[in-house]
Structure formats: C-alpha cells, structure tokens
Image: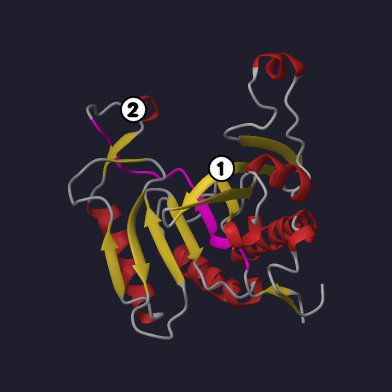
C-alpha cells in the first residue's frame, strides 16, 4: 500500500488540458488574426453546444450540479473556464470538472485520498472530452498538458518556524539573503518571502512557487508545483494518461523528499 498522509497539506490537484480551438469569432473584428491580438472571443452556437453536451455526459457520470462562470453572450478569453460541474449530496467524490474555450480540467479537492482514486475521474473525463470536442477540434493535438499540486502548510505543520526557516530547513530551498541586502536590512530574517523556480524535466517543465500564503483566511506557507508539457500531446486517451502518470511520479517523489522532515506531523500511513 503506497504511503498516504492523514494530514496532507494538499488543497487542490488539477489535471488540465489546453488546445487552440477553431471557429469562434474574435471580438471587435472579423479579421482572423484579431484573436491573437486581443485574446478575447465571442462564442457561437457550436461552442455552446459543446458545453451543453459535456454537461449532459458529466451529468450521467453523477456530476449533476452545473455553474456557468461566464454569463451568456459575454466575451471570454482563450483557455478561460466557462462551466463548472460538481457532484451533489453526501458521500460524493470531492472532484469537479471545468470546461472552457480550449480548456478542460479535473480538480481534486480535500479530503484527497490518493492518485489511484483520482485517476479514474481524469480518465473518464478525458474520454468524454475527446468524444465531444467540436468537429474542427476533434483531432487537433493539445497545446499543453499539465498537472498541478497546490499544497498549504498551516500552523499545525509549520509550528514555530518562520517562512524563511520552513522553506530552507524543511523544503531545503536556500533563502539566504545576499550581503548588499543584509547591510541595509534591520533584520536577517525576511518579513515576507515568495520564490519561483522553473526547471526542465523529462516530459516538460517543472514550475515551483513557494512562500507566504493564505487559505481560508489563515496564514501559512504555499507550495504550488506544476509540471506542464512543452510539446503538443496527441488527442488520444492513452497518450494523455501516460503523461499524467509520469508527471504524478515526478511530483509525488519530489513532494515526499521535500517534506520528509515533517512526515510525522502529517501522520503517514502505508509504505513508501
């Protein structure tokens, strides 16, 4: 049994697909290149039918509650979510789907249990998407495939550490200030800290953002980690799922090693 944490800091896990749709009208001009200039579009009947068909399919999957995020007949931007679909009632999975203009995403929310339990929702959602994309888009590859973990370490996990000491001592990311700053600073300890790192990995880029944050109006430390492809992904379920499993392996191993000093506070179960 893979190791899990009873007090895992995960607040959201997002599997997202993006593509460049065909056939919608750029706002303000009929010129084909206007969309590239403004990034703002007006949907049409076909785009609305795509949203409706996705909603019907997800409804049959148990996601009965739909919420429109952009009002009807209002312009929207590329890769903006337009609809959100969730399950209703007690005992339903903490999962939601979002669909938009060139966008599809699956979100796991607390209480998150495991990748193995989340994966079937990702797989089924992708199958529904591939079947229902507009005809002009159906065979088009995805321009970006990403997997993003948003973790928030609250006071129970941070304890009496400052942000700088937690990031440096627990996550092992150096936070030492350069000498010119230390010469003018009234304290060697930063008052606020937030840093971003992007490194290439085998399947794309790993982006890591860490520092001061808030969740449910409570202060803490945010660790936002995303792996995104730098190459197009074929519109095939098996190819997409291979990428997601590879991205999961990388992020999971990274998180496990970075948080090793506080594993006891997160209450581990199982074997690594």
Position of residue 10 measured from the top left corner of the image (x, y, whole percent): 58, 62
- Residue under circle 1? 212
Magenta includes 80?
Answer: no
Quick one: label 1, few (<14), some, or many (20+) residues within 10 Å? many
* Residue at (47% x, 73% y) in the render: 94
Residue 145 pos. (x, y %): 58, 51
**Boundaries of the magenta span:** 8-27
Which element carries disc 1, helix, strand or loop? strand
Q: Are marks 1 and 2 in contact (CB under 8 Å)?
A: no
Displayed quadrant of residue 86: bottom left
Give the camera-side residue of 241 and 256.
256
Query: How many numbered circles does the render carry?
Result: 2
Tell me if residue 230 can be seen: no
Q: Is residue 61 above or below residue 140?
A: below
Image quadrant in which the C terminus is located:
bottom right
Magenta includes 9?
Answer: yes
Q: Residue at x 31, y 73 (%)?
A: 56
């Amino acid at each position: 049994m893979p190791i899990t944490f009873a007090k895992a800091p995960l607040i959201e896990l997002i599997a997202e697909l993006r593509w460049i749709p065909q056939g919608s009208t750029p706002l303000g001009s009929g010129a084909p290149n206007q969309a590239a200039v403004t990034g703002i579009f007006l949907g049409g009947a076909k785009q609305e039918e795509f949203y409706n068909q996705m909603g019907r399919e997800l409804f049959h999957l148990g996601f009965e509650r739909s919420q429109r995020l952009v009002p009807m007949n209002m312009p929207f931007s590329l890769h903006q979510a337009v609809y959100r679909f969730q399950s209703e009632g007690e005992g339903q999975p903490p999962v939601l789907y979002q669909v938009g203009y060139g966008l599809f995403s699956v979100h796991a929310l607390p209480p998150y249990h495991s990748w193995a339990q989340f994966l079937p929702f990702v797989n089924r959602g992708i199958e529904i998407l591939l079947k229902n994309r507009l005809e002009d888009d159906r065979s088009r590859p995805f321009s970006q495939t990403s997997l993003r973990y948003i973790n928030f370490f609250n006071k129970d996990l941070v304890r009496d550490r400052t942000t700088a000491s937690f990031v440096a001592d627990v996550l092992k990311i150096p936070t030492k200030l350069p000498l010119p700053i230390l010469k003018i600073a009234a304290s060697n300890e930063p008052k606020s800290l937030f840093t971003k790192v992007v490194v290439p990995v085998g399947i794309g880029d790993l982006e890591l953002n860490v520092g001061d944050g808030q969740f449910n109006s409570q202060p803490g430390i945010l660790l936002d980690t995303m792996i995104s492809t730098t190459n197009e992904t074929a519109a095939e379920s098996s190819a997409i799922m291979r990428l997601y499993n590879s991205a999961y392996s990388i992020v999971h191993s990274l998180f496990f090693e970075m948080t090793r000093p506080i594993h006891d506070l997160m209450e581990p179960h199982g074997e690594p």
